[in-house]
Image (spheres, helix red, strand yellow):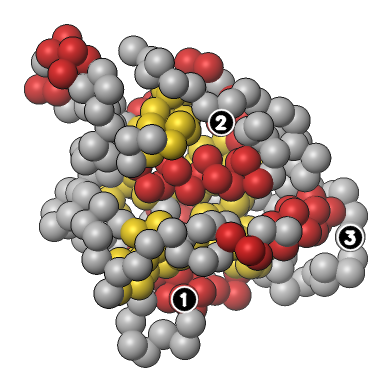
Amino acid sequence: MRFHVAPQSFGSSPYFHINRPLTRRSLLDIKNGLAQCLDDQIPADTAKGQASVLIPLANVMGVPGILLEVRGKTLRSHSGEVSFPGGRVDATDPSYLDAALRETHEEIGIRAQNIEILGQIGPPEVNLGGNMVVYPFVGFVHAGSSHLDHNMADVDDEPLPSCDLDVIRRSVSQTEVGAVFHLPFSALTSPGRLRASLFRGNRPYWAIGVQDLVPNGTPNPALVEDLPNQQESHSTDDSEIGVGKYGSLEVWGLTGWYLYLLMKRLRLYR
């Protein structure tokens, strides 16, 4: 089922190609593109606490895309949902960015020295609970020491080395993370994956189906069995609560909204 209000159409990003590995040149182009949105860093609303997340771009098996996690089933909030690595900013964190990098290492085992920060998107939104402003950062995950071996001045179009997803999966926090998966850029324009949705009731964006990309990903049988009733009762409601609107894993809610903002900034979405 589709919402009657749909986001705008797809474009061809001038910063990267959806089917070619990211290169040093495309990273520089993305960095320059994100630098143009510095005016978007004022939070849309206020809250007592702060959190930050990392949107980790990565090549995996020569395919460019984004690393995402499925939150652990035992977590008190948003368990089993798709998210970016990140969390609450601690008093000991020097900055919001440092918090995002710390949480990324704690959750999926990727160290800060292997992450090249490309910029930020915004405006930062308040989480669904209303108690934290969530600051989103964008970075590229380098395989091994590839980040240390190059300088941004050495711009070329050679594909950057791919991350080994199996190695990352062996390093995840068993309590915080249920799974890690790679969402290819090409999937972001695949009609079969996209569901037109409304963020917080009035802002159109694309929710993205990722069930088949998650190891051992299976829909909630109870939710699937009740699908006709869900479609009827929620046809104009997106509460952002749960793994996806109809029990199948989706990138939606605040995670989906930030991904949509990033793709609009990089002009994959118009």
Q: Give the tally of numbered discs.
A: 3
Q: Nearer the viewer, residue 39 or 219?
A: 39
Q: How many neighbours does mark 3 have within 10 angstroms: few (below 14), some (14-19), or many (20 or more)?
A: some
User: Which residue is at a point 53% across and 57% down the rendered structure image?
Assistant: 122
Asked if residue 142 can be seen in this view, the reply is no
Alpha carbons under labels 3 and 2: distance apart: 27 Å
> Marks 3 and 2: which is nearer the front?
2
Where disc 2 sits, the SS reads helix
Q: How many neighbours does mark 2 have within 10 angstroms: few (below 14), some (14-19), or many (20 or more)?
A: many
Looking at the rendered structure, the kind of residue marked 2 is Leu
Q: Quadrant of the N terminus?
A: top left
Residue 60 against residue 197 in the figure, above or below? below
Residue under label 3: 155
Residue 135 against residue 102 in the figure, above or below? above
User: Which residue is at a point 71% across and 28% down the rendered structure image?
Assistant: 11
Q: Nearer the viewer, residue 54 or 96?
A: 96
Image-based side of 73 in relation to 200, left or right: left
Residue 98 against residue 100 in the figure, above or below? below
Q: How many neighbours does mark 1 have within 10 angstroms: few (below 14), some (14-19), or many (20 or more)?
A: many
Where disc 1 sits, the SS reads helix
Residue under label 1: 96
Looking at the rendered structure, the kind of residue marked 3 is Val
User: Which residue is at a point 77% across and 71% down the rendered structure image?
Assistant: 149
User: Which residue is at a point 65% across and 46% down the rendered structure image?
Assistant: 265
**Sequence-first tag of 3 and 1:** 1
Image-based side of 98 in relation to 115, left or right: left
Q: Are marks 3 and 2 in contact (CB under 8 Å)?
A: no
Residue under label 2: 188
Image-based side of 248 in relation to 166, left or right: left
> Marks 2 and 1: which is nearer the front?
1
**Sequence-first tag of 2 and 1:** 1
